[in-house]
Amino acid sequence: MNERHVLVLPDRDAAEEAAEELAERFGVTEEPQLVRDALAGEDDAEDAQWLVVVEDPEGRLDASALDEFAAGYEGWLEAP
């Protein structure tokens, strides 16, 4: 059962920091993917959210714990 979790974070710095901490805190073995998600109609990089995509091949990560983790970076866990 391969699950994918998407954390939505306010900026690149937060996304990079969260991606690094995921390994320590949750034991994530695959490197999370960082994706810039520009808001509709915005060209400025300052108006972009960043997504941290976490693969969970064994389905062992707790969604509520990930949401709480993302909240610490002023973000959230995107609902599937």
Image: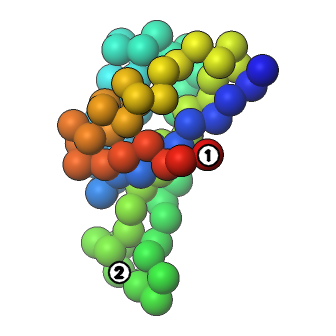
At label 1, the amino acid type is Pro
Q: Residue at x 52, y 19 (%)?
A: 61
**Which quadrant holds residue 18?**
top left
- Residue 64: x and y, percent? 41, 29
- Dot placed on the residue nearer the N-terminal end, 1 or 2: 2
Establish if 67 lies above or below 12: above
Name the element at disc 1: loop
Q: Is residue 79 visible?
A: yes
Graded by Cα atoms within 10 Å as few (under 14), some (14 to 19) or many (20 or more), the crowding at tag 1 reads few
- Residue 24: x and y, percent? 36, 13
Residue identifier under label 1:
80
At label 2, the amino acid type is Asp
**Which quadrant holds residue 69?**
top left
Residue identifier under label 2:
44
Q: Residue at x 36, y 46 (%)?
A: 76
- Residue 3: x and y, percent? 68, 29
Relative horizontal placement of residue 52, taking residue 4 as reference (left or right): left
Relative horizontal placement of residue 65, taking residue 31 as reference (left or right): left
Looking at the image, which is closer to me, 12 or 52?
Answer: 52
Task: Give the CA distance from mark 1 to mark 2.
Answer: 28 Å
Looking at the image, which is closer to me, 43 or 69?
Answer: 69
Establish if 23 lies above or below 37: above
Relative horizontal placement of residue 50, taking residue 6 as reference (left or right): left
Name the element at disc 2: loop
Q: Is residue 34 visible?
A: no
